[in-house]
Amino acid sequence: MGIPIRTVQTETFSMDYFCFGRGATPLVILPGLSIQSVMGSADAIENAYRSLEDRFTLYVFDRRKNLPPVYTVRDMARDTAEAFRAIGLKDVCLFGASQGGMIALVIAIDHPELVGKMVLGSTSANVQGAQWDVLDRWVQLARDGDKEGLYLAFGEEIYPPAVYEQYRDALIAAAQTVTDDDLHRFLILAEGTKGFYAVDELDKIQCPVMAVGVFEDKVFDSDAMMEIAESLDVRGDFRLYMYVGYGHAAFDTAPDYRKRMLDFFTTPAE
């Protein structure tokens, strides 16, 4: 039996999610931008986070169904926060990766009661100028309907070279399953990231934060994480860790990533 996919229904939208684990503390994972829904990878995600299941009940949220034509990161955060409330989540440990990190930032800023501690992985609070370049290339490939080119470009940018070569055939195979609806959804979500800016609001965050970046990040270069760190490092409850050699998706490739999350989430705040 696989992990069951659940749907939370609000007055204005529905959103898929899944959960696993048996711990008393809720840990919410907000994944990054993906070409196809992460709901199809529920079993793989559960396996990757198995080491946390004794301490946490983990929730993984998709973006809402039936996206409007324009759907910004702030819209995503508003709807995700509403989904939290609809299933009774508050004061959670929150992990946001890449675009999911942007959503997490806005939730922590606008809905502080929902977040107890937060980990930000390979994200940005300022998707302008050069920070948009890689996503713009992905958008162009999606507009052209180049499914294989998009999957390969996506993999090449988020993984280090050795991992990309290891997964290359799997990426090509996955591209054969991409539908036109998948591309349309990807375009809306990717374009919703353009121009995102929350640097001036980071001082509103009330919870302890750990930012985990990568010096060789090809999607958002390391300056993006450093900009977040510069705004938060005056606080005693902020932590920064930068990886070398693991690529943008260090949250998938670094073997000690989840141990760092566990240590941060379970260490009493200062």
Image: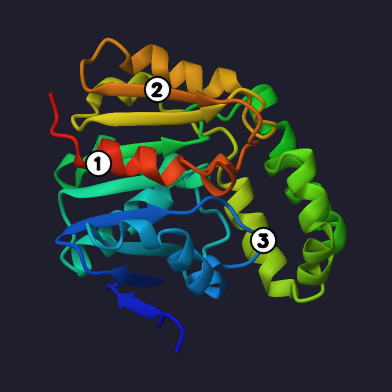
Q: Left or right: where does residue 40 sit relative to residue 62? A: right
Image quadrant in which the C terminus is located: top left
Q: Closer to the N terminus: mark 3 or mark 1?
A: 3
Q: Is residue 215 above or below residue 65?
A: above
Q: Left or right? Give the position of 7 relative to 182.
A: left
Residues at badges 1 and 2 in contact (C-beta under 8 Å)? Answer: no
The kind of secondary structure element at disc 1 is helix
Q: CA distance from mark 1 to mark 2?
A: 14 Å
Q: Which residue is mark 1?
A: 265
Q: Residue at x 37, y 37 (%)?
A: 260
Residue 73 in the image: state x and y as whole percent: 47, 45
> Tag 2: Cα neighbours inside 10 Å, few (<14), some, or many (≥20)?
some
- Kind of residue sitting beneath label 3: Ile
Residue to which mark 2 is pinned = 240
The label nearer to you, 3 versus 1, is 1
Identify the residue at horizontal 24%, vertical 41% (top origin). Answer: 265
Q: Amino acid at mark 2?
A: Leu
Q: How is the image coloured?
A: rainbow
The residues tagged by marks 3 and 1 sit, at their Cα atoms, a distance apart of 29 Å
Q: Is residue 14 visible?
A: no
Spot occupied by residue 257 in the image (x, y as percentages of width and height) = 46, 41
Q: Residues within 10 Å of mark 3 (few under 14, many from 20)?
A: many
Q: Are marks 3 and 2 in contact (CB under 8 Å)?
A: no
Tag shown at residue 174: none
Number of other residues with Cα within 10 Å of mark 1, as a class: few under 14, some 14 to 19, many 20 or more: many
Q: Residue at x 82, y 57 (%)?
A: 168
